[in-house]
Image (tube, helix red, strand yellow):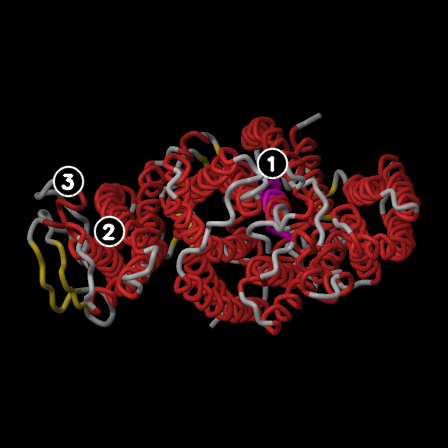
């Protein structure tokens, strides 16, 4: 396997990891007013992701950095082309990150309400827009022969991409509900478990529709297998959620999101950003890549440090493995 | 006004803003880790209180550093896509490594530290803050190595077919002499901010709450912070001196622009005040110290320092017609403000230490005012330092290789950049007000009561126990 393929895979793995991990963070954020009926319950919800959300977000920063280092053309065209969606994602992530940290820093109800809004909006917006963005990457966008984006904002808001946005929104909401059922106790746990089933049905319908449409745009044998796997994992998650096997349900939604993202990358390869205009504008893993020397250095760095990072991140999840409930929340 | 101007303003505003929080994260992570280590070693509750107190201020600030940092990484691709294409082969690598090696370490262990107070064994918890501090400081190295490539490009070649810069020697990029000196200079500047914050908050309580049961803790913090500021001041001067000589060597125009030195001089005098003509091509009035600039720039009081006009002529021959001169008033004054504000913090730290000599309790209202101003001074110094080093590189985005105007995104319209610039400015301004108010609120509240918190009772199941530091 050549280095450009390896780096295509690594970028795919980083985004997959990001969507699995921050997927449930987004889900928890958007369900805050739905599952948290009072302040203490909302604090339970936020504290389930408290120790890990920041580390989860670093998957995005690493994916962006890896894309920049390994495929500068892809990074440059994509980030300048998807300008306004990325701007909205950034603003959402700013508001949301600060909200987690500041929400409990003052006692006033109005203060908390404002930060709750920031958390909800800051979770819903990126959950939709990441789906829109990745659907457009797969579908292709208008690129000229210099690989410059020549479309407008409306080109990005096509029906397929909007379905992509709805799908990620529903998937992350389900993933979040399943996560909360796994990580909390008492009433919150019951409500999250029940909601997960209802959300999951919608997510499954959207995901099957979106993946089918995806495979009709571009496809490969691997993509078909992965898409079927994603659908089966989601159905398995639903079945597990129904009988309140929370660990299995979470495994199911995590695998389903992972395989769905993998489907997109598998269908895309060897392109990284197809052009809907001139074929010469299409960016591929080869023409967007850095030099072999850069890729080789980056490979060494990845080989050495990735296991270490996975090790301590896994350890964090182990440390905070216990369920929490309102009893764990201090009175003030 | 065109998209280029707005993209430059956005980069300037978002970067200076980001760097208001970063120095405090860099410095305070280590200082809080030191305080916690002292508690761990001595068992003295005073250090635990200070760890939690300053730890809280650290976290309020940390969140802002994190969220404004993502913007920085995205911005290269969004507003500077031709720059990203040109240098991606080189510039992307330190950014990716920064995320993988430093940001994961920082963010994961900060989470463990915040939520691990009564979950982790004491040693593991102490190790968490150290791991986060190491991650934070490491991240500075990688991003400065990337920036140093823009100041002094090394370890690359220009591919004649694609016209892009390609990496040929990665160790050379990481050991760029500009990076090696900018890293300690930036860290020293960061500790100047962190130490100043510790002094300001400590001194406030020393003077205002003189009879508090925690007066001893505040006195200790004030002295501790003052020593940090003094050592950091010395380090800033020492590294800044070396940095000046390297700059004279690799970016002579920046040194000339820092000084408003229009014609080549040997020996060159240091300008205390220079007023240039309106078109910026010659000086009208100057007050100077003989030999000093030659010494600062070259280490030799008789050394030659090249002037702006000579360098401009030389670059025009080398790179083709055009202006290669930065905006002189900006470089000249930002350089002076950097030095003046930075040194002022050191001077106040000396006064604070003097006021507490032999166990005295300071009472002066003026000292308190000076102390409270302290954290602002090195923040201004840091900002002016960055404005100087980035504006002094202009018109280049990569010195000698790419002009800033050629790096901007071609596919992004003026309306889009304006939208983005306006949105960031508004959200940043709002958050700044909120953050400063929170910091003041928690600084005024003083050290927490730790009497009921610390002994972890391992014999009981902690399922029903309230969590420490919960969001």
**Labels 1 and 2: the sequence-earlier one:** 2
Query: How far apart, in angstroms, are the residues tagged by discs 2 and 3?
Result: 14 Å
Give me the residue at 13% from left, 54% from top.
Answer: B270
Give me the residue at 38% from left, 45% from top.
Answer: B47
Nearer to us of marks 2 and 3 is 3
**Labels 1 and 3: the sequence-earlier one:** 3
Q: Are marks 1 and 3 on the same chain?
A: yes
Asked whether residue B164 is in view, the answer is: no
Percent position of residue B65, x then y? 48, 54
SS assignment for the magenta stretch, majority: helix
Give me the residue at 53% from left, 39% from top.
Answer: B105
- The mark found on residue B458 in the picture is 1
Q: Nearer the viewer, residue B303 or A308?
A: A308
Label 3: chain letter: B
Q: Is residue A194 above or below residue B172?
A: below
Seen as rendered, the residue at the extreme left is B290
Q: Are marks 2 and 3 on the same chain?
A: yes
Secondary structure, mark 2, is helix
Percent position of residue B141, x then y? 42, 40
| Mark 3 lies on residue | B299
**Labels 2 and 3: the sequence-earlier one:** 2
Residue B289 found in image quarter: bottom left
Percent position of residue B369, x then y? 25, 67
Q: For the C terminus of chain A, which image quadrant?
A: bottom right
Q: Write down the region rendered in magenta.
A: A61-78
Secondary structure, mark 1, is loop
Percent position of residue A27, x then y? 74, 55
- The mark found on residue B255 in the picture is 2
């Amino acid at each position: 396997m050549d280095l450009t393929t390896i780096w295509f895979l690594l970028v795919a793995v980083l985004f997959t990891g990001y969507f699995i991990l921050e997927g449930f963070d987004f889900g928890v954020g958007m369900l805050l007013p739905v599952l948290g009926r009072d302040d203490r319950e909302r604090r339970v919800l936020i504290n389930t992701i408290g120790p890990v959300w920041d580390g989860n977000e670093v998957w995005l920063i690493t994916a962006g950095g890896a894309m920049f280092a390994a495929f500068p053309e892809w990074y440059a065209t994509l980030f300048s082309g998807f300008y306004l969606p990325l701007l909205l994602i950034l603003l959402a992530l700013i508001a949301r990150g600060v909200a987690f940290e500041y929400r409990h820093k003052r006692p006033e109800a109005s203060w908390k309400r404002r930060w709750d809004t920031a958390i909800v909006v800051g979770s819903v917006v990126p959950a939709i827009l990441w789906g829109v963005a990745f659907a457009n990457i797969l579908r292709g966008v208008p690129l000229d022969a210099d690989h410059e984006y020549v479309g407008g904002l409306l080109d990005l808001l096509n029906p397929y991409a909007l379905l992509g946005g709805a799908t990620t929104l529903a998937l992350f909401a389900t993933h979040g509900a399943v996560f909360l059922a796994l990580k909390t106790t008492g009433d919150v746990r019951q409500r999250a478990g029940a909601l997960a089933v209802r959300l999951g049905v919608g997510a499954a319908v959207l995901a099957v529709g979106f993946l089918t449409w995806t495979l009709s745009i571009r496809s490969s044998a691997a993509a078909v297998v992965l898409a079927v796997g994603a659908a089966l994992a989601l159905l398995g998650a639903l079945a597990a959620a129904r009988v309140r096997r929370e660990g299995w349900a979470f495994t199911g939604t995590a695998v389903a999101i992972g395989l769905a993202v993998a489907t997109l990358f598998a269908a895309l390869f060897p392109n990284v950003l197809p052009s809907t205009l001139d074929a010469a504008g299409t960016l591929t893993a080869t023409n967007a890549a850095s030099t072999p020397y850069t890729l080789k250095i980056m490979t060494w760095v990845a080989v050495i440090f990735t296991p270490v990072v996975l090790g301590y991140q896994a350890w964090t999840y182990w440390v905070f493995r216990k369920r929490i409930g309102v009893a764990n929340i201090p009175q003030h | 006004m065109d998209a280029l101007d707005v993209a430059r303003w956005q980069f300037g505003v978002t970067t200076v803003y980001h760097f208001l929080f970063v120095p405090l994260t860099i410095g305070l992570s280590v200082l809080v880790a030191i305080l916690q280590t002292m508690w761990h070693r001595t068992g003295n509750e005073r250090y635990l209180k200070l760890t939690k107190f300053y730890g809280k201020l650290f976290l309020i600030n940390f969140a802002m550093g994190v969220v404004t940092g993502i913007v920085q990484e995205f911005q290269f691709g969004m507003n500077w896509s031709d720059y990203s294409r040109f240098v991606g082969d080189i510039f992307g690598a330190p950014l990716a490594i920064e995320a993988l090696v430093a940001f994961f370490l920082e963010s994961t262990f900060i989470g463990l530290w915040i939520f691990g107070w009564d979950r982790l064994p004491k040693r593991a918890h102490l190790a968490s803050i150290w791991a986060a501090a190491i991650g934070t400081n490491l991240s500075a190295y990688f991003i400065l190595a990337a920036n140093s490539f823009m100041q002094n490009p090394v370890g690359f070649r220009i591919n004649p077919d694609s016209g892009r810069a390609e990496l040929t020697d990665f160790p050379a990029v990481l050991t760029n002499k500009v990076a090696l000196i900018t890293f300690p200079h930036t860290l020293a500047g960061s500790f100047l901010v962190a130490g100043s914050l510790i002094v300001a908050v400590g001194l406030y309580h020393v003077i205002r709450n003189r009879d508090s049961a925690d007066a001893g803790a505040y006195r200790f913090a004030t002295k501790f912070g003052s020593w940090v500021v003094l050592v950091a001041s010395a380090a800033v001067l020492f590294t800044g001196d070396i940095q000046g000589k390297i700059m004279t060597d690799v970016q002579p125009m920046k040194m000339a622009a820092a000084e408003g030195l229009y014609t080549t001089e040997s020996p060159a005098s240091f300008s205390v005040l220079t007023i240039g003509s309106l078109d910026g091509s010659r000086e009208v009035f100057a007050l100077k110290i003989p030999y000093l600039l030659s010494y600062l720039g070259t280490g030799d009081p008789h050394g030659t320092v090249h002037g702006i006009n000579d360098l401009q002529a030389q670059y025009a021959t080398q790179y083709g017609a055009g202006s290669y001169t930065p905006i002189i008033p900006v470089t000249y004054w930002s350089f002076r403000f950097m030095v003046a504000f930075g040194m002022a913090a050191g001077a106040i730290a000396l006064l604070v230490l003097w006021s507490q000599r032999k166990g005295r309790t300071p009472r002066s209202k003026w000292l308190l005012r000076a102390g409270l101003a302290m954290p602002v001074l090195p923040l201004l110094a840091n900002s002016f330092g960055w404005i100087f080093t980035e504006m002094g590189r202009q018109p280049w985005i990569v010195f000698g290789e790419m002009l800033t105007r050629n790096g901007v995104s071609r596919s992004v319209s003026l309306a889009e950049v304006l939208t983005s610039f306006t949105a960031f400015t508004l959200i940043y301004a709002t958050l700044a007000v909120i953050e400063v108010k929170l910091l003041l609120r928690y600084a005024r509240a003083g050290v927490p009561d730790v009497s009921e918190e610390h002994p972890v009772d391992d014999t009981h199941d902690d399922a029903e126990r309230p969590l420490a530091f919960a969001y």
